[in-house]
Amino acid sequence: MKQSDFLKIVTPFQDKLFRMAKRLLVSREEAEDATQEILLKLWSKSKAISSYNNVEAFAMTMTKNFCLDRLKSRQAGNLKLVHSNYRENNTSLQKQVEAIDSVNWVQRIMEELPEQQKMVLQLRDIEEYDYEEISEMLEMKPTAVRVALSRARKTVREKLMEKHSYGIG
């Protein structure tokens, strides 16, 4: 496979790979490294890549597994979940501050979720994959994906309500 053909296949979802890696790993640098590793692995399999039904799902699964392996490694001590790609333009400074505060609270709440719920929430609500794709990527039954997503959303909602009801802390 020529490099240009490979890039045509991979470029449309390359940002999703990065965001998934960023969701699971702490820093932008770690996520960039992980994404580069995945792209190199995909390139090394480029002859077989065209035979995959869903290259994007395959690549997302590779990214998830790579990041989880990384988290399990010795270096994982200082890695944590972060999500900071929320941007909103043309709003007042007060609204921007409130939005950033809400995103930060959601990040903190998501850090406390079980690993599976974090990934399902990331893939469904941020990356906007459908249940079948998530099921394939995470090797879960679609009903298990729905249950994990429901529990994750419920936890986030309850903790946000607590925060807004009781103030900071």
Image (cartoon, grey):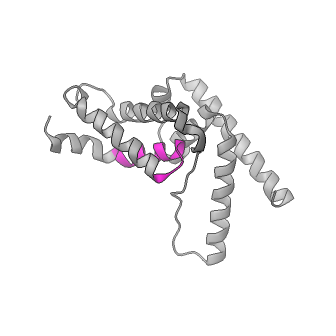
From the top left corner, tell me how far across and down residue 113 is, in percent.
67, 38
Given residues 146 and 68, the one toward you in this image is 68
Q: Is residue 27 magenta?
A: yes
**Magenta highlight range:** 13-28
Whether residue 131 is visible to the viewer of this picture, yes or no, is no
**158 horizontally vs 114: left or right:** right
The correct choice, above or below, for 56 with respect to 88 in the image is above
Whether residue 161 is visible to the viewer of this picture, yes or no, is yes
Q: Quadrant of the C terminus?
A: bottom right
Q: In which quadrant of the rendered view does residue 151 lie?
A: top right
The correct choice, above or below, for 150 with respect to 126 in the image is above
Taking the spot 70% from the left edge, 45% from the top edge, the residue there is 156
Q: Quadrant of the N terminus?
A: top left
From the top left corner, tell me how far across and down residue 46 is, in percent.
22, 31
From the top left corner, tell me how far across and down residue 13 is, in percent.
35, 44
In the displayed orientation, state which residue is furthest to the front.
Answer: 74
In the displayed orientation, state which residue is furthest to the bottom.
Answer: 92
Q: Is residue 84 magenta?
A: no
Taking the spot 57% from the left edge, 75% from the top edge, the residue there is 91
The kind of secondary structure the magenta stretch mainly shows is: helix
**10 horizontally vs 79: left or right:** left
From the top left corner, tell me how far across and down residue 122 is, in percent.
54, 42
Taking the spot 44% from the left edge, 47% from the top edge, the residue there is 31
In the displayed orientation, state which residue is furthest to the left.
Answer: 2
Q: In which quadrant of the rendered view does residue 2 lie?
A: top left
How many numbered tags mark residues here?
Answer: 0
